């Protein structure tokens, strides 16, 4: 029976990064993956394909609407959807193959099949050809990720009623796309299909979009999306979808209850979140404790209640983000090697890759108010940023929240071009315990969008220059 220091179950960003770090630290490592390819949700049906389609559809829209303003004459762009899907698939393939290469490079053994914890030190793999292999290991890291959350009574067929997975492979642009849920995934995929020609209508249970994000950011972002043509119906719920006719018929009711209306649409995207996935793992039999939302309970060292079994990523509490899973993968590998692995959950950025992008790190104004923390706000709009003006990309703003007593940066929220790249500076500032003054005194290259971050930091002390 093969024997290892560590077996990682799942090769998403949590699992594969954990395996590589453990191998770097000298452990004998194996991974188990039930799907045909490595990389998990993120690389196969999540971050990577969605970003490929967001990029391509953004250029399609720009070519149709913006190029003329820049003095570029092109004939009306035509959509080759199959070509765009191929472009997306090649991006996925490149990434997935990259993980396989890294496993080889780091001498990590791979087992393809469903991994089940047969005992604390034993994993059984049911391989795709029906065989069972047993592996012995000192430690197990569960990195089994998450699955789409479903709505009772609305059956996802991945053709007309789709989850994010089906929305990434639609064969034609729907005339009407109804999205249930105004979270990150719904708004990203909604943007893709709107740019390609669909009329996109978003129904959200709460009275705002992007629950959990800074409310001012969400309000401004909703206005921007509405200007782009997306429509929103807040405080509403879809209770049923009838697929018997040529058009889907969705029953929509006020969230608080009341008279229902029927909306006709071609495709419904169910984007109401994700749930932890523990299928086939045998966590119950192994005695691994779950919380009331089905997440594996871990301590500060990612250890479950069963000695030798750890868990990371979407299957445990915390934001369901690839980089959070990666950071936890590194931390647990280092802990297993006797080092001081650690994740700072106050400095995990969150990005929505629409146009403009939305990015945040640290606390929202609502969180600071609820915690009774006094803070100063520095805000700077892209209308006053030189590069944004030159590029005609002036929508949005940077907002910095700094502790009123110490000036320490507590939260940064950006709506604007390249916000997802710019937020890395803010994450670093929070990680290093920087003050707004530190950002304000740091030289930022001109002309760049990043100057808006510096100006927002100056604005914390009411001394922004360009406004
Ligand atoms: C459409 C979409 C877009 C997204 N975009 C972003 C983004 O832009 N940025 C971002 O940070 N996050 C994004 N996410 C979220 C991101 O994909 C997840 O947070 C991330 O993949 C979690 O990583 P993980 O390693 O915990 O799990 P996963 O990536 O879900 O990987 C888990 C792996 O475990 C395998 N597995 C499960 N059980 C077993 C078993 N018993 N035996 C063997 N293998 C098993 C699964 O097959 C899978 O490969 C997106 C998600 C979606 C759906």
Image (cartoon, rainbow, N blue to C red):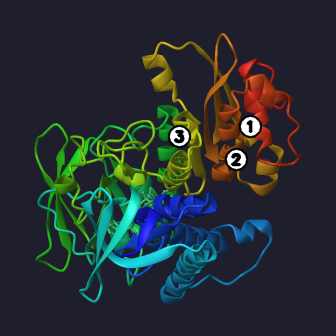
Q: Which residue is mark 2?
A: 422
User: Who's the residue at 52% across and 63% down the image?
Assistant: 19
Say which of 422 and 84 sits in front. Answer: 422
Ligand 1 falls in quadrant: bottom left
User: Who's the residue at 44% across and 52% down the image?
Assistant: 184
Secondary structure category for the residue under label 1: helix
Q: CA distance from mark 3 to mark 2?
A: 19 Å
Q: Which residue is mark 1?
A: 453
* Residue 204 horizontal side relative to residue 355, left or right: left
Q: Depth-wise, is mark 1 or mark 3 nearer the camera?
A: 1
Q: Position of residue 115 (x, y in %)?
A: 31, 69
**How many residues crowd around disc 1 within 10 Å: few (fewer than 14), some, or many (20 or more)?**
many
User: Who's the residue at 39% across and 37% down the image?
Assistant: 299
Q: Quadrant of residue 147?
A: bottom left
CB-based contact (under 8 Å), mark 2 and mark 1: yes
Query: Which numbered disc flags the more N-terminal residue, 3 or 2?
Result: 3
Secondary structure category for the residue under label 2: helix
Q: Which residue is mark 3?
A: 220
Q: Position of residue 349 (x, y in %)?
A: 57, 44
Q: CA distance from mark 1 to mark 3?
A: 18 Å
* Residue 402 horizontal side relative to residue 51, left or right: right
Query: Which numbered disc flags the more N-terminal residue, 2 or 1?
Result: 2
Q: Position of residue 109 (x, y in %)?
A: 49, 76
9 above or below 85? Answer: above
**How many residues crowd around disc 3 within 10 Å: few (fewer than 14), some, or many (20 or more)?**
some
CB-based contact (under 8 Å), mark 1 and mark 3: no
Residue 259 visible in the picture: yes
361 above or below 100? Answer: above
Q: CA distance from mark 2 to mark 1?
A: 8 Å
* Residue 97 horizontal side relative to residue 198, left or right: right
**How many residues crowd around disc 2 within 10 Å: few (fewer than 14), some, or many (20 or more)?**
many
Secondary structure category for the residue under label 3: helix
């Amino acid at each position: 029976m093969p024997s290892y220091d560590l077996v990682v179950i799942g090769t998403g960003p949590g699992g594969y990064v954990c395996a590589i770090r453990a191998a770097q630290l000298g452990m004998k490592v194996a991974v188990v993956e039930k799907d045909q390819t490595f990389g998990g949700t993120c690389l196969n049906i999540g971050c990577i394909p969605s970003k490929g389609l967001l990029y391509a559809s953004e250029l399609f829209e720009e070519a149709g609407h913006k190029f003329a303003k820049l003095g570029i004459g092109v004939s009306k762009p035509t959509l080759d959807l199959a070509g765009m899907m191929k472009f997306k698939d090649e991006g996925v393939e490149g990434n997935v193959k990259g993980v396989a290469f890294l496993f080889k490079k780091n001498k990590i053994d791979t087992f393809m099949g469903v991994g089940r914890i047969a005992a604390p030190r034993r994993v059984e793999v049911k391989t795709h050809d029906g065989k069972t292999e047993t592996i012995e290991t000192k430690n197990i890291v569960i990195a089994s990720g998450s699955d789409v959350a479903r709505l009772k009574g609305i059956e996802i067929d991945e053709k007309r009623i789709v989850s994010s997975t089906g929305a990434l492979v639609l064969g034609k642009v729907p005339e009407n796309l109804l999205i249930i849920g105004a979270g990150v995934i719904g708004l990203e995929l909604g943007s893709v299909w709107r740019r390609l020609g669909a009329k996109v209508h978003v129904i959200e249970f709460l009275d705002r979009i992007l629950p959990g994000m800074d409310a001012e950011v969400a309000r401004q972002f909703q206005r921007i999306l509405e200007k782009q043509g997306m429509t929103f119906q807040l405080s509403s719920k879809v209770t049923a979808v009838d697929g018997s006719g040529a058009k889907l018929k969705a029953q929509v009711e006020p969230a608080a209850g009341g008279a229902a209306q029927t909306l006709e649409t071609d495709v419904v995207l169910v984007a109401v979140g994700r749930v932890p996935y523990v299928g086939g793992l045998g966590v119950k039999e192994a005695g691994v404790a779950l919380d009331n939302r089905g997440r594996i309970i871990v301590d500060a060292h990612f250890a479950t209640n069963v000695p030798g079994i750890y868990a990371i990523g979407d299957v445990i509490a915390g934001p369901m983000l690839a980089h959070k899973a990666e950071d936890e993968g590194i931390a647990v590998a280092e802990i297993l090697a006797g080092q001081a692995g650690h994740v700072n959950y106050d400095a995990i950025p969150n990005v929505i890759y629409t146009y403009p992008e939305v990015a945040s790190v640290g606390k929202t104004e609502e969180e600071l108010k609820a915690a009774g923390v006094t803070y100063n706000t520095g805000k700077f709009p892209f209308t006053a940023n030189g590069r944004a003006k030159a590029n005609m990309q002036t929508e949005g703003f940077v907002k910095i929240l700094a502790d009123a007593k110490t000036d320490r940066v507590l939260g940064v929220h950006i709506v604007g071009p390249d916000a997802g790249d710019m937020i890395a500076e803010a994450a670093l500032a929070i990680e290093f315990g920087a003050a707004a003054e530190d950002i304000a005194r740091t030289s930022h290259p001109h002309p760049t969008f990043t100057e808006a971050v510096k100006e927002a930091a100056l604005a914390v002390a009411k001394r922004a220059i360009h406004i």
